[in-house]
Image (cartoon, grey):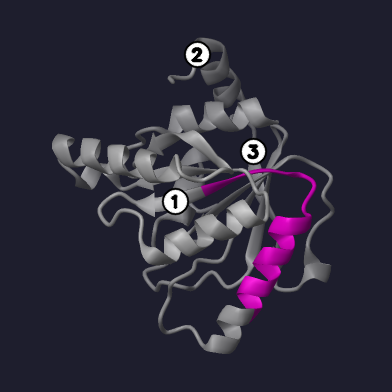
């Protein structure tokens, strides 16, 4: 299911124009108006969400990257002048985060997912080296129960051999096929090597 030339060109144009940070929300009241199409990015802490957002938008430091997992403790919104807003959701699975923090992040994230009319899709990032884990499965079930359309992006594919890449993609496709709200295509990627970015951009362009 490769993106056609028109979709690839639409994706390229979508991210040619500047993108900038517009809001960071720690409460529902701080969420920006749902006045433009939004694509959210979810994943375990340290899965590479910020790096992928920076790579997709051709910015070196649009989204903050950190060596400390769990640093993103709010929903961060980035407006792209091409006509889409990207949402960096708080990472999950960070053991050192306090239970009260995790509860607050979960509550806000769930409120966003369930009531955001402008949300077109959640891109769920999975570290290709680790595969889908139990905490990822919990999130997948939440997406299904919330009727949130989602798709999987495999990150850090450049760290794997060709055989390992094929295995990671095949097993991920088999598991996501069991979920009613999941998009059937898996998007392999590497922010470092700029791999798979055109396909992801084309996918986003089709949604808005």
Viewer-side residue, 144 vs 93: 144
Q: Residues within 10 Å of mark 1 (few under 14, many from 20)?
A: many
- Horizontal arrangement in the rendering, residue 153 relative to residue 9 (left or right): left
Q: Which mark is residue 4?
A: 2
Mark sitting on residue 18: 3
Q: Position of residue 180 (x, y in %)?
A: 56, 43
Mark before the other along the chain sequence, 3 or 2: 2
Range drawn in magenta:
104-123
Furthest residue in direction top, as rendered:
5
Q: Say which residue appears at 51% left-offset and 46% top-offset.
A: 179
Tell me the distance, in whole angstroms, between the alpha carbons under discs 1 and 3: 24 Å
User: Relative to residue 92, is residue 134 drawn left or right?
Assistant: left
How far apart are the alpha carbons under marks 3 and 2?
24 Å
Residue 203 visible? The answer is yes
User: Looking at the image, is 79 positioned above or below residue 17?
Assistant: below
User: Residue at 84% of width from left, 53% of height from top?
Assistant: 33
Q: Which quadrant is home to the N terminus?
A: top left
- Sequence-first tag of 1 and 3: 3
**Mark 1 or mark 2, earlier in chain:** 2
Residue placed under numbered mark 1 in the picture: 125
Q: Is residue 145 left or right of residue 70?
A: right
Proximity of marks 3 and 2: CB atoms separated by less than 8 Å: no
Which percent across, then down, holds residue 125? Answer: 44, 51
């Amino acid at each position: 299911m490769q993106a056609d030339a028109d979709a690839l060109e639409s994706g390229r144009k979508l991210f040619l124009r500047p993108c900038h940070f517009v809001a960071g929300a720690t409460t529902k009241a701080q969420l920006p108006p749902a006045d433009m199409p939004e694509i959210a990015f979810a994943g375990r802490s340290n899965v590479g969400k910020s790096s992928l957002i920076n790579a997709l938008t051709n910015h070196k430091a649009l989204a903050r990257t950190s060596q400390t997992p769990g640093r993103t403790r709010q929903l961060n919104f980035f407006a792209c002048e091409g006509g889409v807003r990207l949402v960096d959701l708080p990472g999950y699975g960070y053991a050192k985060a306090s239970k009260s923090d995790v509860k607050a992040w979960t509550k806000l994230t769930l409120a966003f997912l369930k009531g955001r009319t402008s949300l077109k899709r959640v891109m769920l990032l999975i570290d290709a080296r680790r595969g889908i884990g139990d905490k990822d499965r919990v999130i997948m079930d939440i997406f299904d129960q919330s009727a949130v359309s989602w798709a999987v992006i495999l990150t850090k594919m450049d760290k794997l051999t060709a055989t390992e890449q094929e295995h990671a993609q095949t097993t991920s496709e088999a598991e996501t096929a069991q979920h009613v709200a999941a998009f059937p295509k898996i998007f392999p990627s590497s922010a470092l090597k700029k791999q798979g970015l055109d396909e992801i951009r084309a996918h986003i362009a089709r949604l808005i």
